[in-house]
Image (tube, helix red, strand yellow):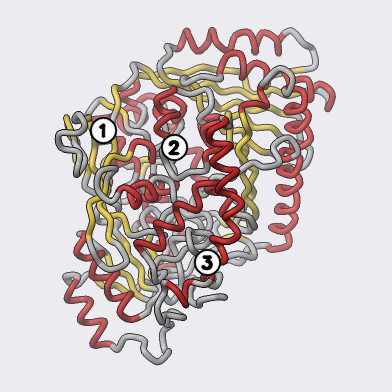
């Protein structure tokens, strides 16, 4: 961390306890008389005629979501849902389901009481106004990927913008309020219900340009941007949030605002990494696009060490090699360390040819081959393809069908595909999930031994990965500068990687199957042990809000660091009554865990 930011953090963090006390005191100051949200059957819950009025206001698009598993195995809905259980597009198309089915001892996916299948900002504004007037719990689900359950809440009114998926390219875009102040930029405008595959298809496959989005193709665009938004090539192009130019957002008072750095700049800044579902409902985003590199590519391989001692040496060599050859804007994705003394490589590159990528890795693979203690459980291979085909479903069907899976339902877009490696997350039930940003200072020659010791010690407890694209250090300077101008924890700019350790099991939706909580708690203990070993060399490491521990105690500091005070001020300004509440979201310390009752 640079001196200027260190001083900012030193000044702001001592104020954090007071700010949190103020947040809990909101009912007496900013929040008016609202002390609790209503549930069905309670006095004041909207009468049928009132729901009918909302239905008319939204053009008939008011639904009562029902889980397809609710009727039991003998029903057609149940059978079809089981058939599509590993199809993330099918899960996303059902307002009663989420892409994550729950988290042990934390939450379980359950449908809302009602849902507005929004097709416009006016529909969203009508839903927000109805929830505010009737004191309802409001929840927003775009892609539904939230690990922490922020896109679901039983007994709530759901805003479901799945149909708001229009994608529009701009040769030269000027954000609102920027006329005459900033030069037009190539950009893309995206509806809040779009998934990243919709955007990649329009921008890259058809348009021949690049937009920084998420690695998983079915993640929702709006949620990813609001959480910060890493993709495989973030070191080269920045986070998704750092490339936001403008957003349309519905605020708690039902107003539809167009925000940018020139209009409502504090709300705009808060949407860039301040977490989804806390400041308003985003209905449209406009992101800058970039010139597309000639090639995207990947390097794969798995190395087996013959002993613990040899594995410790392999870890040290891998860290030194990363610092020397890969710590730059070209490389992203991960190395995976495991208790069975394997090191799995799953790295991607941009801006290089296949020959250049092979040359970069040659010293490391030569070192492995020169030592008898190591063997290749998976032989190393390097692949490169024209970047315009990286998300081209037709290209992969012809050349590498094993790498992708189609949405095989009739009538669905032919370009809808998901990476085969991401199917394990579809509907999964989380046992544990923790992350920590590792500072680039650990790569210095005098610190590498301690880093290698920590990585080795962590690998004794549980497998985990270092995601190099989820730390901006070593990346393109302009991308780092844009990322610093977001609401994310400032540590992201000085981290070389995000360490992620997680475990889970197959789908456990209510009515489908029950999770093995004994197994889940054992896995959680192992994950905690691995992360504890890593945090010995990074004791103050922050955590990425989208990929973090549900039970994180100091989440305000962990997710946002010195930026939390500013986010809380924006929350008080644009949502003083706390209509938008999500687990561990800005201002949520003033509400009960389920988001229904004021606390303090």
Residue 334 showing in the rendered view: yes
Foreground pick, 341 / 279: 279
Q: Which of marks 3 and 1 is in front?
A: 3
Residue, x 71% and y 41% (percent of image)?
A: 539
Q: Which of marks 3 and 1 is nearer the N terminus?
A: 3
Q: In which quarter of the image is residue 48?
A: bottom left
Give SS at disc 2.
loop
* Horizontal and vertical percent position of residue 206: 22, 30
Q: Which of marks 3 and 2 is nearer the N terminus?
A: 3
Q: Distance between the residues labelled 1 and 2?
A: 15 Å
Question: Residue at label 2?
Answer: 215
Question: Residue at label 3?
Answer: 22
Pick out the residue farthest to the bottom: 43
User: Where 569 sits versus 130, above or below?
Assistant: above
Residue 70 showing in the rendered view: no
Crowding at label 1, few (<14), some or many (≥20) Cα neighbours within 10 Å?
Answer: many
Q: Earlier in the sequence, mark 1 or mark 2?
A: 1
* Horizontal and vertical percent position of residue 281: 32, 59
Residue, x 61% and y 33% (percent of image)?
A: 466
Rendered-image quadrant of the N terminus: top right
Crowding at label 3, few (<14), some or many (≥20) Cα neighbours within 10 Å?
Answer: some
Question: Residue at label 1?
Answer: 203
Foreground pick, 379 / 563: 563
* Horizontal and vertical percent position of residue 231: 44, 35
Crowding at label 2, few (<14), some or many (≥20) Cα neighbours within 10 Å?
Answer: some
User: Where 224 sits versus 140, above or below?
Assistant: above
């Amino acid at each position: 961390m640079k001196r200027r930011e260190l001083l900012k953090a030193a000044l702001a963090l001592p104020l954090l306890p007071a700010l949190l006390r103020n947040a809990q005191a909101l009912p007496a100051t900013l929040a008016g008389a609202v002390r609790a949200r209503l549930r069905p059957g309670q006095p004041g819950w909207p009468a049928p005629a009132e729901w009918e009025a909302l239905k008319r206001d939204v053009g008939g698009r008011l639904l009562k979501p029902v889980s397809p598993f609710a009727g039991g195995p003998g029903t057609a809905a149940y059978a079809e849902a089981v058939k599509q259980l590993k199809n993330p597009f099918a899960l996303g198309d059902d307002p009663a389901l989420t892409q994550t089915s729950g988290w042990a001892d934390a939450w379980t996916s359950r449908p809302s009481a009602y849902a507005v299948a929004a097709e416009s900002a006016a529909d969203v504004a009508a839903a927000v106004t109805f929830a505010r007037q009737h004191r309802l719990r409001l929840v927003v689900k775009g892609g539904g990927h939230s690990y922490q359950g922020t896109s679901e809440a039983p007994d709530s009114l759901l805003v479901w913008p799945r149909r708001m998926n229009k994608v529009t390219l701009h040769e030269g875009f000027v954000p609102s309020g920027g006329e005459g102040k900033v030069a037009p930029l190539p950009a893309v405008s995206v509806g809040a219900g779009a998934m990243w595959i919709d955007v990649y298809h329009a921008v890259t496959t058809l348009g021949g340009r690049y937009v920084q989005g998420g690695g998983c193709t079915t993640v929702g665009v709006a949620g990813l941007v609001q959480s910060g938004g890493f993709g495989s090539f973030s070191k080269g192009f920045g986070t998704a949030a750092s490339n936001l130019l403008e957003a349309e957002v519905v605020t708690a008072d039902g107003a539809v605002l167009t925000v940018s750095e020139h209009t409502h700049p504090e709300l705009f800044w808060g949407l860039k990494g301040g977490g989804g579902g806390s400041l308003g409902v985003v209905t449209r985003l406009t992101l800058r696009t970039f010139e597309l590199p000639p090639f995207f590519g990947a390097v794969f391989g798995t190395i087996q060490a013959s002993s613990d001692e040899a594995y410790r040496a392999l870890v040290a060599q891998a860290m030194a090699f990363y610092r020397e050859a890969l710590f730059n804007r070209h490389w992203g994705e991960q190395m995976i360390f495991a208790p069975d003394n394997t090191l799995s490589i799953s790295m991607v590159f941009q801006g290089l040819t296949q020959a250049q990528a092979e040359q970069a890795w040659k010293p490391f693979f030569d070192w492995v081959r020169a030592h008898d203690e190591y063997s290749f459980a998976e032989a190393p291979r390097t692949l490169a393809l024209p970047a315009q085909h990286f998300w081209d479903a037709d290209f992969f069907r012809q050349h590498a069908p094993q790498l992708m899976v189609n949405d095989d339902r009739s009538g669905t877009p032919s370009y809808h595909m998901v990476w085969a490696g991401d199917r394990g997350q579809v509907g999964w039930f989380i046992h544990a999930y923790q992350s920590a940003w590792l500072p680039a200072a650990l790569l210095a020659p005098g610190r590498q031994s301690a880093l290698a010791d920590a990585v080795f010690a962590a690998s004794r407890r549980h497998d985990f990965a270092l995601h190099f694209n989820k730390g901006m250090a070593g990346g393109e300077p302009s991308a780092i500068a844009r990322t610093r101008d977001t609401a994310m924890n400032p540590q992201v700019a000085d981290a070389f990687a995000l360490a992620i350790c997680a475990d889970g099991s197959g789908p456990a939706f209510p009515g489908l199957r029950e999770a093995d909580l004994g197994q889940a708690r054992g896995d959680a203990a192992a994950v905690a042990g691995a992360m504890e070993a890593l945090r010995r060399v990074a004791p103050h490491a922050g955590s990425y809000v989208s990929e973090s521990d549900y039970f994180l105690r100091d989440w305000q500091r962990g997710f946002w660091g010195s930026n939390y005070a500013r986010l809380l001020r924006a929350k008080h300004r644009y949502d003083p009554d706390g209509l938008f509440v999500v687990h561990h979201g800005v201002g949520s310390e003033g509400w009960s865990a389920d988001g229904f009752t004021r606390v303090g």
